[in-house]
Amino acid sequence: MKKIFIINGSQNFAHSGGKFNETVTNWTIEYFKNSKQFEIKTTDIKQDFDLDEEVEKFVWADVIIYHTPVWWFQLPNQFKKYIDDVFTAGHNKGIYKSDGRTRTNPDINYGTGGQLHRRKYMLTTSWNAPAAAFTLPGEFFEETSVDDGAMFGFHKMNKFTGMEKLDGFHFHDVEKGATAENIDIFKENYTKHLKKTFNFSQL
């Protein structure tokens, strides 16, 4: 049985109520609960949590699934604080031991001191920006993908801990395009992604 740790990284702030990522988190929970091949644990960062218990969830899991909106092209501040606090609490407790370097040769092996080897992670993000903003010449993101652009640092953070990236899923145009019909399409496409990514024989 594979162990899945699902994190809802949304928060309430200004005009955002975090509802979309809560919905996506529930889709994910529903998907894995319907299979007898997976055991799940969850965290909603808006709720109170214990740092040591969160560290234990990362160490326990085979796969971590992050759900987050993107605010001003970065993680929301509360989600960033969650990661800062939990990963720091995980020093020598299963998340990372060091930056990987030695004093005798400090120029090499940076980023190899993680302790979460044999774990994988998947990221979903939600954007007001349409998908075309990342792909069309002359548009805002200059033909740079979410993963190679705004989320580049996020992926390096996970690599630092020793985790391996699974293909993620990015929801676009979720403000202006969040019609009931489009939400159904989002769910259908995301569920197909989960089925493809979590083919049990490939994990």
Image (cartoon, grey):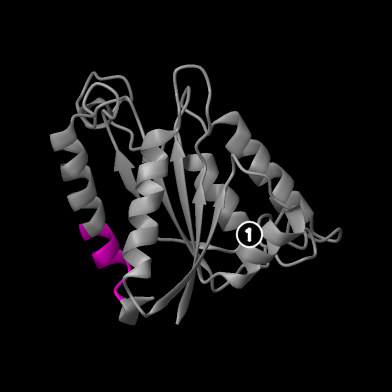
Figure check: 70 above or below 62: above
Q: Residue 115, percent across and down? A: 68, 67
Spot occupied by residue 109 in the image (x, y as percentages of width and height) = 68, 60
Q: Is residue 66 left or right of residue 88?
A: left
Residue drawn at the location 24% of the way across and 66% of the way down: 196
* 21 is higher (above) or lower (below) than 25: above
Nearest the camera: 196 or 178?
178
Q: Is residue 147 visible?
A: no
Q: Is residue 187 above or below residue 112?
A: above
Residue at label 1?
161
Residue 104 is situated, as x and y percent measured from the top left of the image, at: 85, 61
In the image, 5 versus 161, the foreground residue is 5
Q: Quadrant of residue 19?
A: top left
Dot 1 crowding, Cα within 10 Å, few <14, some 14–19, many 20+: many
- Is residue 198 shown in magenta? yes
Q: Quadrant of the N terminus?
A: bottom left
How far across and down, in percent of the image, does residue 176 sit? 24, 21
Farthest residue, direction left: 181
The residue positioned 21% from the left and 39% from the top of the image is: 183
Going by the numbered disc 1, the residue's amino acid type is Thr
Q: Name which quarter of the figure residue 139 lies in.
A: top left
- Report the quarter where the C terminus lies: bottom left
Which is nearer the eye, 72 or 30? Answer: 30
Q: Is residue 25 magenta?
A: no
The magenta span reads 192-199
For image coordinates 73% across by 45% down, the residue present is: 85
Camera-nearest residue between 43 and 152: 43
Q: Main SS of the magenta segment?
A: helix
Q: How many marks?
A: 1
Residue 62 horizontal side relative to residue 30, left or right? right
